[in-house]
Each structure stands twice: as structure tokens, then as C-alpha cells.
Amino acid sequence: MAKPSRPAPKPSLRLLDPFKGVTSSTPPIWLMRQAGRYLPEYREVRAKAGGFLDLCYNPALAAEVTLQPIRRYGFDAAILFADILLVPDALGQGLRFAEGEGPLLDPITSASDLSRLQPSATRPKYALVAETVARLRQDLPKETALIGFCGAPWTVATYMVEGRGSKDHAAARFWAYRDREGFQKLIDILVETSIDYLGQQVKAGADVLQIFDTWAGVLPDDELDRWVVEPTKRIVEGIKASYPDVPIIGFPRGAGAAALWYVSETGVDGLGCDTTMPPYMMGETFQDEPVVVQGNLDPLLLVVGGDAMDERVDEILELMDGKRFIFNLGHGIVPQTPPENVARLVERVRGS
Ligand code: CP3
């Protein structure tokens, strides 16, 4: 069977260097949530779009807000503007973003609710996201990589089951303990549709993929294996079967010591490290693994800026000098971040 097509890889992407084993004392840099409310130009487009979802499903505007931080800061990568919750939305669960409340979904709480999800109906919405990717492929500078993404099944499931964000993700954890088979069916649906969704992003021009598992850290080890490691491994295998050369970064936030096992079991090419990962582990332990590490400045230090930020940035850079490393935050930029602090960070990392 012929391999699915994708645009020819760009020759000069610094973001890809560490994946090829090419290292430097000036690592590539991009930041999680680099597009968003901390930028006045984002708020302007967001107001014009109407709701947040209208923005995500408008390829011209979604491409525009993806480009905004690239114009300002010249990051080595752009991340597609979308959201991990577009997947349950495309499956037909019904998603809205209420002002000040975050995401709201009609909860799926048992196996009998799964019939509400329609994997075959995702096409039109996934196609809009793929169109954003295709536009970005045209409009991004040739040296800027494009990162496609999805949420990992576990993290997406926590929102689907709870119907909203929560602190302890108890609804999903209870279901997973009480009815393993039923919960596995939800995870299976998410694995399959995520492979389809990410594959469409690569086909449209994404250079690298990231799988966000924001709530991996709430699970005990055996549950983490079942609901984080196994599903991620299946997604990685599914993508690699068609696109073996597209690097995949996993971000199992809060996994702690289990991150090592996550790396060896899932086959990810990159590990997104959260703020709690000691940089010496990024610079030592993980360098024995065939993996690029990415992270992990505290986003709150980016709000504070100044010497406090510089000191930590220098510490990370020193420990990661010459290692397979991508500079990033340990979690997403927060809305109160002063844009000038981001400029200062980029200058510091680039040594300019
Ligand atoms: O610049 C980028 O990083 C690209 C776009 C992106 C968004 N969300 C845009 C967004 C990405 C990669 C995400 C990932 C995402 N979304 C995650 C995983 C990463 C993480 O931060 O842990 C999660 C858990 C979500 C779910 C989500 N989306 C929540 C809980 C919320 C509400 C809280 C919040 O941060 O506002 C969102 C909304 C959201 N997603 C916004 C943006 C820019 C804010 C919406 C607005 O403009 O009002």
C-alpha cells in the first residue's frame, strides 16, 4: 500500500536538529500556549471571531493567531491554534466555553452514553483544522516548524466524563475503577480518532506532533500504565505506521518518576518536562534514552521576569548545554504574562 502523502519536509528547521542528534548551546525555543490572551493582538482577533470555538474553526483567523507570536518573537516553532477539546466536540459531545467558567461539555458518564459519540461524523471539523495547517504551511517563515497536537486520551476523557475542568478528575477515575471495560471503550474511541486527527494534520503540513497529557499525574502507577502509557503507545504506533519520520513529543504532566517508563514504553521521540522535573534529570538521566527533552521554565517566572527569571534560564541553559534539548516552559503561558518578558526570555536563550 502506498504511504499517505505529505508535503516535502522543509530543509532548514532548527526544531528538528535535536531529533537528529544535532545539539548546540543555543537550543531551539517555542512556548506552550504562545498564542493567547497575554497578547493584545490575540484579544483583538478573538473579539472579532465571536466565541473561542468560532476562532478555532475559522482557518483564516486561527492561522492568523498562530502567526502572531512568530512575528513578535521569531520562535523556532509555531503551534497550530486549536484546542484539545475539539476532539470531543467533533465527536458530537457538545462543547461550549462559558466566560470565566472554562470548557463545559454534556458529561458522558457510562458506557451506554458512548453511543452519543460519532467517530464517523468528525470529518467536517477535522477538515477545518487541517485547512488551518495547510494555510500555515504556506504562510510560516521557511525556518519555522509547525507543531500539530492533540490531547492524550486520558486527559481528554477527564473533561468528557466530568463535563468540565476539575481539580481531582474524580469522575473519570471512578468510572475507570468501577467499569474498566466501559472506560476502555471510551479510551479506544479517543485513540482511534486521535490517530485520524493527527494524521490529517501531518498530511496538511505539520512537521512535529505533541500529545498533551495534562492530567497524567493524578494516576497511580498501574492506572497510569493502562490509561496514559498504553493509549499513547497506540497513537505513536498508529502515526509511525504512516509517517515514521515525524517526531512526536509526549507531555505526561506530573508523571514524575514514571516519565522514564513512559518514554521507553510509548516510543515518543520527545518528552515535554513539567516544572517539577529537576533539570539535572533532563540533562543526565534522559540523555541515556533515545529522546529529546523539552521544558521546563516555570510559567510564573515568565510573569515575574527580571533577574529571577534570568537566573533560572541560565541554570537550565548551562545544564542542557550540548544536550538533545528544546527550550520551553513547564506548562502553558498564563494570561497575565507581560509580552516584554517573553522577548527578554527569547533574547536570553538565544544569547543575543
Ligand atoms: O498557543 C497554543 O498553545 C495553541 C493552542 C492551544 C490552546 N489550548 C488554546 C486555548 C493548545 C495547545 C491548547 C491545549 C489545551 N487546551 C490543554 C493542554 C495544555 C494545558 O494547558 O494543559 C488543555 C487542558 C486545554 C483545555 C482548555 N482550553 C481549557 C481548560 C481552557 C480554559 C482555560 C484557559 O486556559 O482559558 C481552554 C481555553 C483555551 N485554549 C484558550 C486558548 C488560547 C483561552 C480561550 C480564550 O481565548 O478565551
Image (cartoon, rainbow, N blue to C red):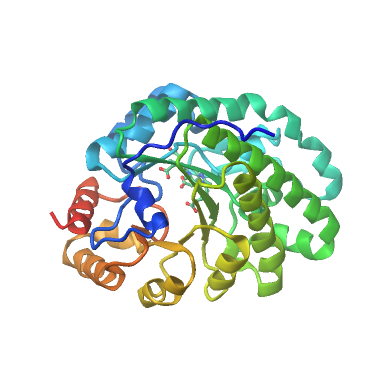
State the image coordinates of residue 255 (x, y, percent, origin top left): 55, 69
Is residue 321 found left or right of 288 in the rendered image? left
Q: Is residue 217 visible?
A: no
Which residue lies most toward the front here?
A: 1
Residue 117 in the image: state x and y as whole percent. 76, 37
320 versus 140 height, above or below:
below
Q: Is residue 307 left or right of residue 148?
A: left
Residue drawn 68% across and 30% down? 122
Instruction: Please provide percent x and percent y for residue 157.
Output: 67, 51
> Toward the viewer: 302 or 64?
64
Give the position of the C terminus as an image quadrant. bottom left
Q: How many marks?
A: 0
Q: Residue at x 84, y 54 (%)?
A: 182
Residue toward you, 151 or 18: 18
Residue 218, image x and y in percent?
Answer: 61, 67
Q: Residue at x 31, y 34 (%)?
A: 142
Q: Is residue 287 left or right of residue 261?
A: left
Q: Is residue 222 above or below residue 250?
A: below
- Most foreground residue, 153 or 102: 153
Q: Is residue 163 above or below residue 90?
A: below
Residue at the image position 58 percent from the left and 68 percent from the top? 264
Does residue 123 appear in the picture of this structure? yes
